[in-house]
Image: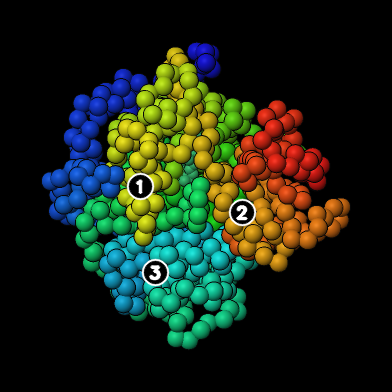
Amino acid sequence: MFTTETLYVPPPALAEGAHVAGRAAYDALVREAAADHQAYWARLAREFVEWKRPFKKVLDASNAPFFKWFEDGTLNASYNCLDRQVHAGLGAKVAILFEADGGEVTRVSYADLLARVCRMANMLRAQGIKKGDRIVIYMSMSIDGVVAMQACARIGATHCVVFGGFSAQSLRDRIADTGAVLVLTADQQVRGGKHLPLKAIVDEAIGLGGCEAVRRVVVAKRTGADIAMRHPRDLWMNDLLACQADTCSPEWVGAEHPLFLLYTSGSTGKPKGVQHSTGGYLLHAALTTKWTFDLRPEDMFWCTADIGWVTGHTYIAYGPLALGATQVVFEGVPTYPDASRFWTMIQDHRVSIFYTAPTAIRSLIKAAESNAETHPDRFDLRSLRILGSVGEPINPAAWEWYHRHVGGGRCPIVDTFWQTETGGHMITPLPGATSLVPGSCTLPFPGIDAAVVDETGADVPNGQGGILVIKKPWPSMIRTIWGDPERFRKSYYPDDFKGGYYLAGDGAIRDAETGYFTITGRIDDVLNVSGHRMGTMEIESALVACTELVAEAAVVGRPDDTTGEAICAFVVLKGSRPTGDEAKAIAKRLRDWVGKEIGPIAKPKDIRFGDNLPKTRSGKIMRRLLRSVAIGEAITQDTSTLDNPMVLDQLMHSN
Ligand code: PRX
């Protein structure tokens, strides 16, 4: 499939001095892991993590698929990220260079960050928070957001960050499911020059009921807006921090102690709380940050993700700090004040490693085409060494543009495939070792036993598509779904799937010649819109929850040039089928409704109305037909089993 001309070979200077230097070094690591999987991970766990009590057991598979790693070892994630750096003489080194939405820059050294985390941790303890308590963090990109996560880790509380774009209903569901006792938030968030509510949404969420465990809401001041504070539940963060000491003894926890919960969408039901461990997770966060980005002490690292997503956990809040790196944390959006914001920031802060999502690249390509002032060619981006991509497939055209115009043709692009559940990179190039092919995430990270199999679990030959699995457990894997171990087993290790492998939920194909992996997309009902993961069922449930209007709804994805996939909803109303302006008005109402139920990211781009949905005679909605209708392609599928063929025509022409 790939010819040698489409391979980008690692630049020789990089290949020589890299942490994993050359393909032979990569192959040697893969061989080491294959020869003794446990010994390989144990070696790295000793090298990358500072343990309070060293582990003796490496992997416990006695209750598979509930695997345990390094179980008898104890550690503290915050100690590993902060105290360790200060002890190593990096106290004065900048840990976080924060750029606010409006452009103000704040630098926080490792010593400062440690002190801030300790104050926040002491404050939480003073509020009665103990090891194992769950704390929901509903904050935007900020130093306080990272400090909050680290402070929870310091006292053994399990954090659950909720993306600041989620609605009150989504926030409520997460607060209720985790049984959180405290919520950390801010008065407002600032994005693209706009002030948006946070605390008001927390109030609304708690008001929806089911959040009775919440004793306190601690509010950081971002904009100083006049917001409602409810006595005695709500307290200002600054008042509480003022009297706290800036040292705080870490709570040593077992390696399996849940560091965090993070909700993500599956193909059925409500979002699931993915539970991550402390030891195995931290190991993979540090290891992949170092090897995948070939991180060096002098690098300026910038991951543009939000701390509300897993990428912001692993490659902002934990990985770079565990390695003593200096990183940029950005509050704003790539298009404000204009679409050159990323390039300006790379230039100003001499960013050397830049990690972003294909959606951002695609929208910045469009912007540069319409306004040459925002083209990356106009900026001095020579500080860049390594580029990264995450969250969705990167199409070769976007890859080439990113490589040429952002990377100046000299920076390898690491196209990192992974998931909320995997904790860190699974399949990715290593910049000094792997030749690149645009659109391929290339080869498994050393120690990750990825394969493409058929429904029976048997390997399929290279060149043939199949189901992506990870055959052996790995340290940073999901431990369970919070409160629902059965759903964990069914989702990732279903009994009817042979082999006992981890099912990623994606399809993949390996190149016949190179063995390189290309992800072919989800094989379940999960959509990926702008790198945000959403279940079609979740959006359908939100639509039918509008009981006043909606009788039935079906949601499918269709390819979109900018967002990767777009949400297309087919709706049957309780009243008659609307047309013209009425249809437009109702579509807008439903879009806003979904925005309130889930969040703006879940608003369908396209809403179509029919008297019915295409169903088989047994009443099953024929989604594959709806996909064709959404794309606007000719229906080639067999429609003879369709109960009501005329609705296809209606849906096809209803927008
Ligand atoms: O379908 C894959 C896609 O994103 C899914 C995971 O989404 P989430 O848990 O939100 O994590 C996103 C950040 C890691 C995967 O099942 N995906 C992620 N990275 C890639 C990708 N698809 C293709 N190429 C990638 N590099």
**Residue shown at 56%/66% (left/top)?**
169
In the rendered image, residue 572, in percent from the top left (x then y), is placed at 72, 54
Q: Which residue is mark 2?
A: 540
Q: Earlier in the sequence, mark 3 or mark 1?
A: 3
Regarding mark 2 in the picture, which secondary structure is present there? Answer: helix
Could you tell me which residue is drawn at 15 percent across and 48 percent down? 55
Tag 1: amino acid: Arg
Tell whether label 1 touches label 3 (CB within 8 Å): no
Answer with left or right where residue 53 lies relative to residue 618: left
Q: Amino acid at mark 3?
A: Gly
251, 653: nearer the viewer: 653
Residue at disc 3, secondary structure: loop
Q: Earlier in the sequence, mark 1 or mark 2?
A: 1
| Residue found at x 29% / y 53% | 278
- In the rendered view, does 561 fall on the left or right side of 181? right
Q: Is residue 560 above or below residue 261?
A: above
- Check the image and report above or below for 186 versus 538: below
**Kind of residue at badge 2:** Glu
